[in-house]
Image (tube, grey):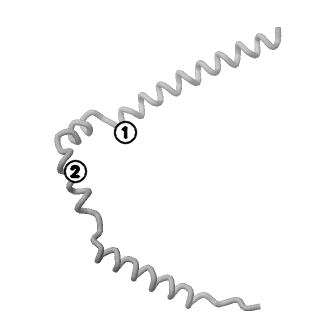
Amino acid sequence: MEKDDRIRELEEENAKLRQELLSTKEHLKRYTNPPYRQEYYEKNKEAIKQQARERKPTSEQKKEYNKRAYIKRKEKLKNQPSENI
């Protein structure tokens, strides 16, 4: 009898948690993917894709970023005291 009660209790808790999960998903859907954003994307899909292409750094910019990162790494290693035991 105790096992049956415990199983029934767990099943009820499971159903309650599932219902809570569904309600939370519905609530989040309202904020994370509202219809007006979908409409805007559908109307301006090509413009958004074009903007994304334009944001990519050119090869010259990549070289400059890499050079700057290399110099920073060298300075950091230079400033760290070396431990030779």
- Determine the image quadrant of residue 70: bottom left
Kindly give the residue lying farthest to the top in the view shown: 1
Kindly give the residue lying farthest to the front in the view shown: 59
Quote the CA–CA distance across marks 2 and 1.
19 Å
Q: Are marks 2 and 1 in contact (CB under 8 Å)?
A: no
Which amino acid is tagged 2?
Ile
Above or below, 55 relative to 11? below
Above or below, 7 relative to 22? above
- Residue 50, percent across and down? 20, 55
Q: Is mark 1 on a helix, strand or loop?
A: helix
- Determine the image quadrant of residue 82: bottom right
Kindly give the residue lying farthest to the right in the view shown: 1
Query: Which numbered mark, 2 or 1, is in the foreground of this view?
Result: 2
Residue holding disc 2: 48
Residues 53 and 18: in front is: 53
67 to the left or right of 47? right
Q: In which quarter of the image is the C terminus?
A: bottom right
Which amino acid is tagged 1?
Thr
Q: Residue shown at 73%/15% (left/top)?
A: 7
Q: In which quarter of the image is the N terminus?
A: top right
How many numbered dots are placed on residues in this image?
A: 2
68 to the left or right of 34? right
Q: Residue shown at 77%/10% (left/top)?
A: 4
**Dot 1: within a 10 Å radius of its alpha carbon, few (fewer than 14), some, or many (20 or more) residues?**
few
- Residue 20, percent across and down? 53, 25
Q: What element carries label 2?
A: helix
33 to the left or right of 22? left
Counting residues from the N terminus, which is met first, the one under dot 2 or under dot 1? 1
Above or below, 13 relative to 55? above
Numbered mark located on residue 32 in the image? 1
